[in-house]
Image: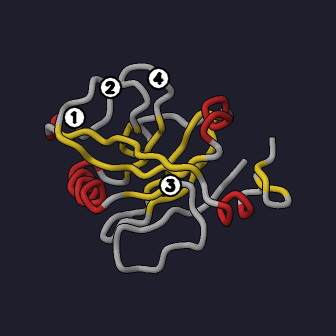
Amino acid sequence: MPDTAAGTATGTAAPAVSRVDVTGAAADMLRHLAATHGQLMFHQSGGCCDGSSPMCYPVGMFRVGASDVHLGTLHVEGIYPVDVYMSRSQFEYWKYTHLTIDLVDGRGSGFSIEAPEGKRFMIRSRMLDDRELEAFGLATHGSVSP
């Protein structure tokens, strides 16, 4: 089960390799939400409710289970670290991607706590680069492992 730290949205040093990150706009919303709801976490939705949007919850409101993978931790200045999870079955499809949580205008149709703010979190993804593939054990001799 991968357990990697995520990058930061602040001036603090980011870990060498991460699976998840956060944009400045999303970090600002997380600070706003944390002021009201306390410590937060994300679970990357697998298609129910709001498609494949990242769902933000106060810690304890969503139960993470043995079938969930910890993708990493977002370190946003001014709030507790924010853990990010995804179901193991969905992770099998996404394990070659880096995910960045962003914020856009609009209301999602899920249970994520930013909805009343007229904003929604969304995922921007890219393929892992060679260095990241190597770090996560997904590359062998310059090629991606099956």
Locate residue 129 relative to residue 1 in the image: left or right. Answer: left
Which residue is under mark 3? 20
Do residues under tags 1 and 2 come within 8 Å of each other at their CB atoms? yes
Secondary structure, mark 2, is loop
Q: Nearer the viewer, residue 13 or 63?
A: 13
Which residue is under mark 2? 110
Residue 55, position as x, y percentages in the image: 39, 37
Spatial distance from mark 3 to mark 1, Cα to Cα?
21 Å
Q: Nearer the viewer, residue 73 or 102?
A: 102
For residue 47, the mark is 4
Which residue is under mark 1? 115
Amino acid, disc 1: Ala
The nearer-to-camera label among 3 and 1 is 3
First in sequence: mark 3 vs mark 1: 3
| Mark 2 surroundings: few (<14), some (14-19) or many (≥20) residues within 10 A | some
First in sequence: mark 4 vs mark 2: 4
